[in-house]
Image (cartoon, grey):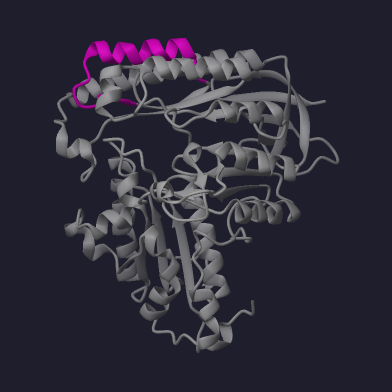
Amino acid sequence: MNNINNVFFKKNYFYIETYGCQMNIYESDAIASLLLKSGLCLTKDIYKCDIFFINTCSIREKAEIKIFNRLKYLNLIRKNKNPNMIICILGCMSERIKNNFFLKEKKLFDIVISPKDYKSIINIIFSKLDINIRNFTNIILEQDIQNNINSDRIFGNNITSFVSIMQGCDNMCTFCVVPFTRGREISRSPKIILEECKILYNKGFKEITLLGQNVDSYFWYGGGLKKNYKNIKKVKTVDFSNLIELIAKSIPIRIRFTTSNPHDFSEKILKIMKKYKNICNHIHLPVQSGSNKILKKMNRKYSREEYIYLINKIRQYIPDCSISHDIISGFCGETEEDHIDTLNLMNYVKYNYGYMFYYSPRQGTIASKKYKDDVNKKIKKRRLQEIIFLQKKHSFFRIKQQIGTIQEVLIEGISKKNNEYFYGRNSKNTMVYFKKVKNIVYGDLVKVLIKYGNYSNLIGKII
């Protein structure tokens, strides 16, 4: 497609800042690619940009506070240095803003574009910048970046990349804003996903991470919402196990995936992971709580016993598989006994690492409407610290298991602390540091003998 900079009387510059999950990173890439093809110019200079995009996260209250503090700073820049700068909100917070959850903060930004409206982003931005859209840009305007191939990668290291396979979530966990910010589940075509993966491989990328709010519920029957499938008869379907096998056998590229939900995780996925060496031995399997009472209040749709059964299945198929988690402390009605159930579950699994938070109500969620936030904040923080302390102990235990082993590591860059060292991740998603060797470069898969490590990283030597 021809660049259309000649349409404009002056160059229009944009800046993108991304917060939150891998999906936001992927979407920032796709949006930047679309804007560049439409004639806008990317800049790293805040004082120069005509439009500042801030791609937001809304999963925790802390994330939203951080973004509003950033917006206040941007408004100071606008007042003193760049008076014509337009500020645009993207990502998960945009839908919550549209639902009027942040009325007092609306003066801090000019445009709000939710993930549901990304297909119209060029129309919206060009209108705000007062740019005349010519007829020959219609092919761009009609693109839906969530369903078409994004073959460009504007940000990142050109070695690893994210590939979105689906959007939204149907599970309706009571604490979660995702169903409200991202909508119902919609899967992308396996043909388009495979084509995007092939393009990345041919461009030299060595690893992809398949993304979805819940990858295990990926389901393709020809397009549309998953819930509408029951009205379709005699149609070929593709689930996540089919999709990951299709990619693994078609392209010799290293594959990761995130995030999984225990309720939807299939034993078929474990069989595929065991079968193909290019699928990494790591599963992110959020548990949220070890208490059946709390799991039920969270609407997690599995019990403690079912979760443990799944852990045992993982160990059966892939004994050295790395498993990580999400855990929330202090959810509504959580007692000390419920907290101990969580600690006991952690002791059973001994996760490699995890993401741990104390509960904060999210306006608009089921929990905020249905349950009282009745656990004292000091108790939440104390329980969270106990969870973090135990996880550090387990992480170090898992690290020690890898000392003395030979790990295959994909080189992703140079250590910021010591430029004589490379870094990269092994199949278990553990970061490995090792001294540079002649004729070894970024993107190489190397064998590393692990010498020692701390609770989060490994140190080794290329062999």
**Farthest residue, direction front:** 234
Residue nearest the viewer, comparing 272 with 409: 272
Residue depicted at x 75% and y 26% = 448
Q: Is residue 166 left or right of residue 110?
A: right
**Quarter of the C terminus within the rendering:** top right
**Farthest residue, direction right:** 439
**Depicted 51 relative to depicted 242: above or below:** below
Residue depicted at x 50% and y 46% = 22
- The answer to whether any part of residue 416 appears in the image is no
Residue depicted at x 41% and y 52% = 225
The location of residue 54, given as percent across then percent down, is 40, 59
Dividing the picture into quarters, in which one does residue 1 lie? bottom right
The location of residue 341, given as percent across then percent down, is 33, 12
- The answer to whether any part of residue 211 appears in the image is yes
Residue nearest the viewer, comparing 278 with 453: 278
**Depicted 404 relative to depicted 116: above or below:** above
The location of residue 124, given as percent across then percent down, is 38, 74
Q: Please tell me whether residue 329 belongs to the stretch shown in magenta.
A: yes
The location of residue 138, given as percent across then percent down, is 51, 80
Residue nearest the viewer, comparing 79 with 249: 249
**Depicted 338 relative to depicted 287: above or below:** above
Magenta segment: 328-351
Q: Please tell me whether residue 335 belongs to the stretch shown in magenta.
A: yes
Q: Is residue 100 left or right of residue 221?
A: left
